[in-house]
Image (tube, helix red, strand yellow):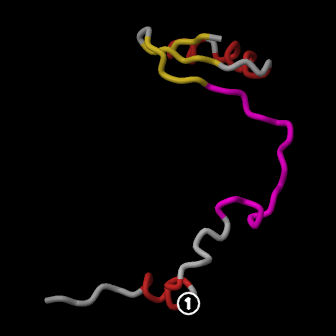
Amino acid sequence: MKATVLDFRHRMKDILHALDKNEPVTIFYRGKKKGIIYPARRQGVTNASAKEHPVFGIWKDREDMRDVGKVLRKLRKGRPNVV
């Protein structure tokens, strides 16, 4: 479906109906394509644990991050009083 910014105000029901039919909605502003809204995926949603995420453990080899308490104390430490 193609929709303009004005359609969002006056035809939102039609836009939502198109998304319910798994149809992407292309948004136009002043005749130029601004973006595409894709329907949310409802199938195949899993509750995977954080350990299964590919980003988990990316800093496991960093030596400066071994002592988490030390890193947190350094982050939370206030600024020195410079007069």
Q: Secondary structure at mark 1?
A: helix
x, y percentage for residue 10? 59, 12
Check if residue 56 falls in the magenta segment.
Answer: no
Q: Which residue is mark 1?
A: 69
Residue that appears at 72% across and 59% down: 53
Is residue 18 placed above or below 46 in the rendered structure?
Answer: above
Residue that appears at 86% across and 41% down: 44
- Count of numbered tags: 1
Q: Quadrant of the N terminus?
A: top right
x, y percentage for residue 78? 35, 86
Residue that appears at 44% across and 8% down: 31
Please identify the dominant SS of the magenta region: loop
Check if residue 45 falls in the magenta segment.
Answer: yes
Q: Label 1 sits on what residue type?
A: Gly
Is residue 30 placed above or below 83 in the rendered structure?
Answer: above
Residue 25 occupies quadrant: top right
Which region is colored magenta? Answer: 37-55
Residue that appears at 54% across and 18% down: 27
Residue density around tag 1, few if under 14, some if 14–19, many if 20 or more, within 10 Å: few
Is residue 82 placed above or below 13 in the rendered structure?
Answer: below
Horizontal side of residue 50 vs 46, given as left or right: left
| Front one among 42 and 54 | 54
x, y percentage for residue 66? 57, 87
